[in-house]
Amino acid sequence: MVRRHQTLRCTFRNNDGEPELAIATELTIKLPIVDLRADPLKTREAEARRLAIEDCQQPFDLENGPVFRAKLVRLAGEDHLLIVTFDHIVVDGWSHGIFLTELTALYQAFLEGRPSPLPDLPMQYADHASWQTRQFREGAFNAHLDYWKRQLRGAPPFLALPADFPRPEAQNFRGAREFFKLDPKLMEKVSAAGRAERSTSYMVLLAAFQTLLARRSGQTDLVIGSPVANRGRADVEPLIGTFMNTLALRTDLSGNPSFAELLARVRQMVLDGLAHQELPFEKLVAELQPARVLGYGPLFQVMFILQNTPAPTAKTGDLTFRHFDIDAGSSKMDLTLNIEETEEGAEAFLEYATDLFKSETIQALAQEYVALLEEMCEDPSRPIGTAPAVASLLGEANPLGAGRDNVQMGWRKTTPPVHKSNGNGNGRTRGNLHADSVALTELQQELSGIWAGVLGVKSVGLHDDLFDLGGHSLLVTQIIARIRKTWGVNIPIHHFFEEPTIDVISGLIQQELEDQVATSKP
C-alpha cells in the first residue's frame, strides 16, 4: 500500500517559508508489536485504548516523515488491535475506507501466496493537485468563489453559544466526546419528514441542529461548517489523500418559521452549496480575509457531520475487522455534532472544547437535540421557537429573533410517492423497483449502465428513482461527473432532487446535446 499510494510516502519541507512537497521513491514502515496477553484479561482493552489515545496525541514530523504510523497490539491468541494513525494532511474519511478495503484484499492474497489483486491506480494525488492548480489559473473556480462571497457577505463572524468557562485567548484544541443514540423509530421519522419536504435525512438533522443552536445563542443568522467528500471525479475515488472540502453553510432562521419552512430554506441552501463545493475552503478564507482571532476559527466555530462514506469490506477469509472507537481528547471546533447512520438507527456524539463546556452541559445539549428532533418530526407545522419538549428541557428558552441580529457528504435521500401518468390513463408511482418494459434508447441504456455501476445494482429501469435504489448525494456527484465525461454536458445537481429517473435525466442530457449542436451551427 505504501508503494501504491504516493501520499503515504510524502513529506513537506520548508523552502524559504514556502511548503515544498517531496515524494520518496520507497519507504520502509516498521510495525511495532505490543503484547498484552500477560496482563489481566479485564484490563487489556483499557490498556489498548490508552495506547491508541497516546498514539493519536503524538505529533508528526512532516519534514522528515513518515506521515503515518502503525502499531499492532496483541490482546489474545486470535484478537489483535491494529492502531494506524495518519496526519490529516494526507488522508480524509473516505481514505480510511480505501485503506481497510485494500488491507483486507492484500492480506487474503498474500495469505494464499497470490500477488496483489488490486488494479493499477489511474492517477496519483499529485496529478490531481496539478490539475486543480491549472483550473485555478484558468479561472474555472471564479463562479464558485463569486457564489460564496455573495453567500457569506455580512455573515456574523462568531456564534455566541453560552459557555461554562471564559474563552481562552488562544485555542489549545483540548476536547472530549459525549456519545448518544438516535433510535430506529426516530430515524424513520427523520426519513419521513424529509420525504414530505423532498429533503434528505441530512437536511432534517442539520435543520434541527441549527434550531437548537439558534435557541441556545439567540442568533437567527448562523454559519455552520460541514464536510463533503469532494470526490465527484471517478479517477480520484480509489486514491488515499485529502480530497475532503468544507462548506460554510449559512441559514436564516428569522421570523420564527415552521420546521417545514425552515427545512425548505435548508434544502435550497444545501443544494446551492453542493453546486459550488469545488472551491477549496482554504481559498475562500484567503479571499475573504476574515479577522483572525486566536481564540476561535474563521467563518464558523460549529460543525455538523453525517457519516456515510463507503463501508469497506470488514471480513476476509476467517479474519474479521471491527471498528474500535476512541476519544482522542481533542476538538478542532467549539462544538461538532457527528452522526453515523447504522442498521440500528444512528450513533452520534458531540465533540466539544473542554476549555468552554462542562460534560454535563453537553449531555443536556444531546438530550435537547433528540427531544427537539422528535418534536419537529412529529409536527413540522409548529414554529421552531415553540417546541414544547425543548422548552421544558431548557426552562426559559432563548427566543428566536424576528430578523437577522447579528455547513464519504453523501446523504441518503428519500422522496414522496408522485403519481405519474404513463400516457394511456394508467398511473405509476415513483420508486417502483421492477424493470420497465419499454425499450430504452442508446443514450438511456448507457446512462442506466452508469447508474447501475455507481449504485452497485444489476439494472436500473427507465422510471426507477435513483434514491429508492440506495442513492445519496455523494453518488449523485459521481454520476454527474460520469455524465460530464461521457457526453460533455453538465447537469445541475438540483435536477436530481426533483425527479431523478433515467427518463428525466436522459431527456436533460439530450436537450443539452441538441443545444450544443444548435449553437455550433453558423
Image (tube, rainbow, N blue to C red):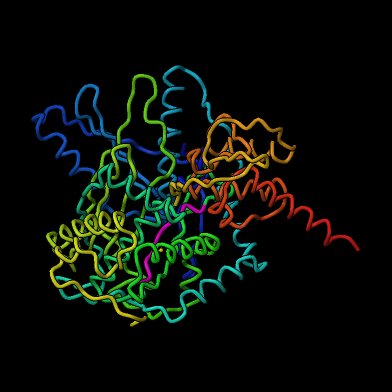
Whether residue 235 is visible: no
The picture places residue 279, in percent across and down from the top left corner, at 53, 64
Q: Residue at x 47, y 36 (%)?
A: 1
The picture places residue 214, in percent across and down from the top left corner, at 29, 71
Q: Residue furthest top?
A: 112
219 to the left or right of 240: left
Q: Residue furthest right?
A: 522
The picture places residue 239, in percent across and down from the top left corner, at 51, 44
Would you identify the image quadrant in which residue 157 lies?
Answer: bottom left
Q: Residue at x 22, y 50 (%)?
A: 327
Is 221 or 189 nearer to us in this picture? 189
Would you identify the image quadrant in which residue 314 lies?
Answer: top left
Secondary structure that dominates the magenta span: strand
Picture quarter with the C terminus: bottom right
Residue 227 located within the stretch drawn in magenta? yes
Is 485 or 130 nearer to us in this picture? 485
The picture places residue 249, in percent across and down from the top left corner, at 42, 66
Relative to 78, residue 214 above or below = below
Magenta highlight range: 222-230
* Number of marks in picture: 0
Q: Residue at x 44, y 66 (%)?
A: 265
Whether residue 502 is visible: yes
412 to the left or right of 37: right
Residue 320 located within the stretch drawn in magenta? no
335 to the left or right of 472: left
Is 158 or 320 nearer to us in this picture? 158
